[in-house]
């Protein structure tokens, strides 16, 4: 595998935007992401610039990790957000200890199954542990079987927390966690 695994740089926002839009066009995007392609594509460049700067190399509270192919194409990504104790998360649940929260996981279809996602997750976990996280979590739609299998394979276990989806009544997501060793 000749990929470069690294954090994004703030000035790379156009490439970060393109990869996010590609992710939102994936056939299972409706299960994997809370945002739609139409919502994302309508956002101004300033949004993408600010979003990328918040998760870029050197940012303290979040990090977007990408996989770059030998030809320079970005073929995979994920983002880790740090959540501090005493705050509430995006779903309104209290955060009880410092933790990482993995979001925005995407690998281009032609790159799946070759170990790349595992390498991205290893980099994300390494960053979260170095930032002082006691655990790392992610939220996954209960019908996203491929993601559920992968997260279990990576050592994530269900926590028992269920997150109802306000935008899609009747659907829910499950929290999975991995503890720092």
Image: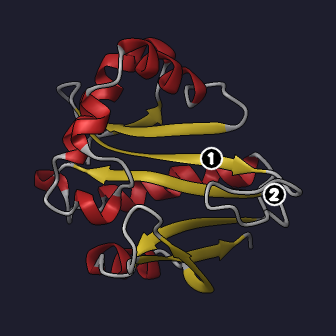
The picture quadrant where one finds residue 161 is bottom right
x, y percentage for residue 107? 26, 51
SS class of the residue under badge 1?
Answer: strand
User: Dots 2 and 1: beta carbons under 8 Å?
Assistant: no
Q: Which residue lies at the image location 48% right of the left edge and 53% below the top edge? A: 103
Relative to 108, residue 121 above or below: below
Left or right: 167 as drawn, with respect to 156: left
Relative to 79, residue 14 above or below: above
Along the polypeptide, which appears first: circle 2 or circle 1?
Answer: 1
Left or right: 112 as drawn, with respect to 134: left
Left or right: 12 as drawn, with respect to 177: left
Q: Which residue lies at the image location 81% right of the left edge and 57% below the top edge? A: 98
Of residues 55 and 28, the one drawn nearer to the viewer in this rendering? 28
Cα–Cα gap, marks 2 and 1: 11 Å
SS class of the residue under badge 2?
Answer: loop
x, y percentage for residue 76? 30, 45
x, y percentage for residue 44? 36, 16
> Which residue was labeled with disc 2?
98
x, y percentage for residue 66? 39, 38
Quadrant containing the C terminus is bottom right
Q: Residues within 10 Å of mark 2 (few under 14, many from 20)?
A: some
Of residues 24 and 120, the one drawn nearer to the viewer in this rendering? 24
Q: Which mark is residue 81?
A: 1
Q: Which residue lies at the image location 34% right of the left edge and 24% below the top edge? A: 43
Q: Which residue lies at the image location 28% right of the left edge and 46% below the top edge? A: 36
């Amino acid at each position: 595998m000749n990929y470069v695994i690294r954090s994004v740089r703030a000035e790379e926002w156009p490439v970060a935007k393109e990869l996010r839009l590609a992710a939102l066009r994936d056939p299972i995007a409706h299960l994997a992401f809370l945002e739609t392609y139409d919502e994302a594509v309508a956002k101004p460049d300033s949004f993408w610039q600010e979003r990328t700067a918040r998760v870029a190399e050197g940012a303290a509270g979040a990090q977007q990790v990408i996989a770059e192919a030998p030809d320079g194409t970005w073929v995979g990504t994920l983002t880790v957000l740090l959540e501090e104790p005493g705050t509430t998360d995006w779903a309104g649940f209290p955060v009880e200890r410092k933790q990482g929260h993995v979001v925005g996981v995407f690998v281009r279809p032609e790159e799946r199954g070759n170990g790349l996602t595992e390498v991205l997750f290893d980099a994300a976990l390494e960053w979260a542990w170095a930032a002082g996280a006691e655990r790392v979590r992610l939220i996954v739609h209960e019908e996203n079987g491929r993601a559920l299998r992968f997260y279990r394979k990576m050592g994530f276990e269900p926590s028992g927390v269920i997150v109802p989806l306000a935008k899609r009544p009747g659907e829910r997501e499950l929290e999975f966690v991995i503890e720092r060793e």
